[in-house]
Amino acid sequence: MKVYITLCLSVCVYLCEALVERDSDAIIEDKDVLVLTKSNFEWALKQHNQLLVHFYAPLSGQSLGSILEFREAAGALKEAESDVRLGGVDVKKEKDLAASLNVTRIPSLRLYLSGNKNNPVYCPDLKSSATILTWLERRKGQSANIISNLTQLEKFIGEEELVVLGLFKDLEEDIVKVFYETAADIADLPFGVTGNDEIFSKYEISGDTVLLIRKSKPDKQFELGSSTVKTDLVQFIRLYEMELVTEYNGETASKILNSVVLNHFLLFINKTEEGFEETYLAFKTTAEKLRGKVLFVMMDVSEPRNGRVMEYFRVRSEEVPQIRMVNLSDHVQYQLPSDKFDTQTLLEFCLKYLDGKAKPKLQSESIPENWDTQPVKELVGMNFEIVAFNHNKNVIVLFYAPWSSESRALFPLWEELAEHFRENEDVVVAKIDVTANDVNIHLREKYPSIKLFPAVYSERVVPYSGKRKLKPIVTFMKKEIEKAKTDKAKEEERRKKYLNEQKAAVKEEL
């Protein structure tokens, strides 16, 4: 009897495992991309020896473009019957999975090999389907074309505007591996390698060198030594792949956004108007002095396709030429406070910015009529600091984007919150459109975000990260308000003591 029961249990376990495997095998596909979840991720790793995974947030602007390119690459690989499969993880839905895999950058790509979840290959920024396919192809075999003679060289340098050529006396030495590794990671540029003496003579090069060739002519070169590592070579290529002044367009946009130089100096100008040549020359001359520190970008406002970027920077064609400085790590804008566009003015402004002495450009909508008569106060850039940093008021502010559904979903809650504190004159419930108004505080979170400005003498900002419901927000506010009262009382006592000491000192002098 015991044997029979044990046998039945074993059969049941076997059947359950088989059913689980059958269900796991049927992973949903969306446009040839495997939809990966916490429940099927491990199974997908077992099924596919090479699994390239895209971690994304569907509502993010950056993710949207990468999702479309990733799908296109997935379709091409499936059609070619490649061994590589592509899968996607929506980190908003799969927070536990993303946390377990330590995913911190969105969007990002990782290549998982042989079912190993713990040691993926972290991919470089691959912005297009073509670069994804090139990167995968270069991982399989030679990542650079072998250039054996001058005829092959002419064909190679004539195919693209910019190519990377490695010249090595011995193609078997270790330093060549660094070049191949670099070529594998920089999938958006053609790489060639040669040991041909005639090619060395053509470019008057004697040692191991990497040459950037632009429009079939040598532009910049980097001499390699025994201590050269891949990051050195990547830095050199990414720094000099751009011209002194890069015009923004569909082809250059991704390179500009992925540049290793984060300080971007933007010239908004109409190329068809009088005075363009003079301003452009001053801009380019300034660029020569700051290469590696600042990336110089020109935006032609007469090009209709640049309208979205102009809208983002709130630049109107009637206001050009206009110059902005922006750092891609914080997106704070600085505007040239001058209508002069000579080299000296441009250089002085850049140096002032690099020294941390330039003032950010603050933009604001007009103050709405009767802005403070409604339960929820509508703030703009011009009245934000006056209201938020009032030491007699505890001000809770919703920073929102009007086009964001997530932001709009909080509006009823904000009305409810204002009603809750309606009888409390010490509390102000407010909101501000951060896409139309600049505020001089660092917004670390993506909108919508919530911050409390307590009634204290210092400019204190307390971010709220709890549940977006009335009760937890009220609890949070009451706790911070009580703390603010204590701190304010201490500060008033300190000020009173200081004032009495000053009065006593004056009496002694008299």
Image (cartoon, rainbow, N blue to C red):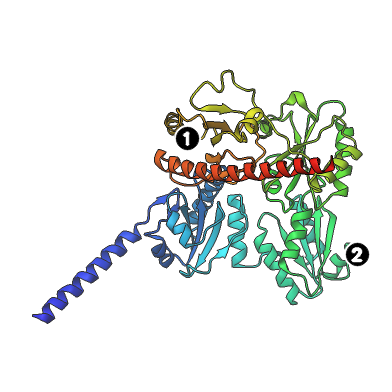
Which is in the foreground here, disc 1 or disc 2?
Answer: 1
Location of the N terminus (image quadrant): bottom left
Q: 220 or 195, which is in the foreground?
A: 220
* Vertical comparison of 79 with 432: above or below: below
Q: Classify mark 1: residues with Cα within 10 Å, few (<14), some (14-19) or many (20+).
A: few
Q: Residue at x 77, y 70 (%)?
A: 228
Q: Residue at x 74, y 51 (%)?
A: 261
Taking the image as shown, residue 238 lies to the left or right of residue 475, namely: right
Q: Residue at x 68, y 44 (%)?
A: 497
In the rendered image, is residue 99 in sight? yes
Taking the image as shown, residue 19 lies to the left or right of residue 507, namely: left
Q: 419 or 111, which is in the foreground?
A: 419
- Three-letter amino acid code at disc 2? Glu
Provide residue 480's location: percent of width, then percent of height: 51, 44
* Vertical comparison of 371 with 479: above or below: above
Q: 7 or 132, which is in the foreground?
A: 7
Q: Residue at x 88, y 49 (%)?
A: 289
Q: State the residue position of label 2.
A: 204
Provide residue 63's location: percent of width, then percent of height: 54, 46
Instruction: Indicate the secondary structure of the residue bearing disc 1.
Output: helix
Taking the image as shown, residue 264 lies to the left or right of residue 377, namely: right
Provide residue 225's location: percent of width, then percent of height: 81, 72
Give the distance between the C-alpha atoms of the residues marked 1 and 2, in whole angstroms.
61 Å
Does the residue at mark 1 contact the one at mark 2 (Cβ under 8 Å)? no
- Three-letter amino acid code at disc 1? Ser
Location of the C terminus (image quadrant): top right
Among the two numbered marks 1 and 2 on one chain, the one whose residue lies closer to the N terminus: 2
Instruction: Indicate the secondary structure of the residue bearing disc 2.
Output: loop
The dot on residue 405 is: 1
Provide residue 306's location: percent of width, then percent of height: 68, 33
In the rendered image, is residue 400 in sight? no
The dot on residue 479 is: none
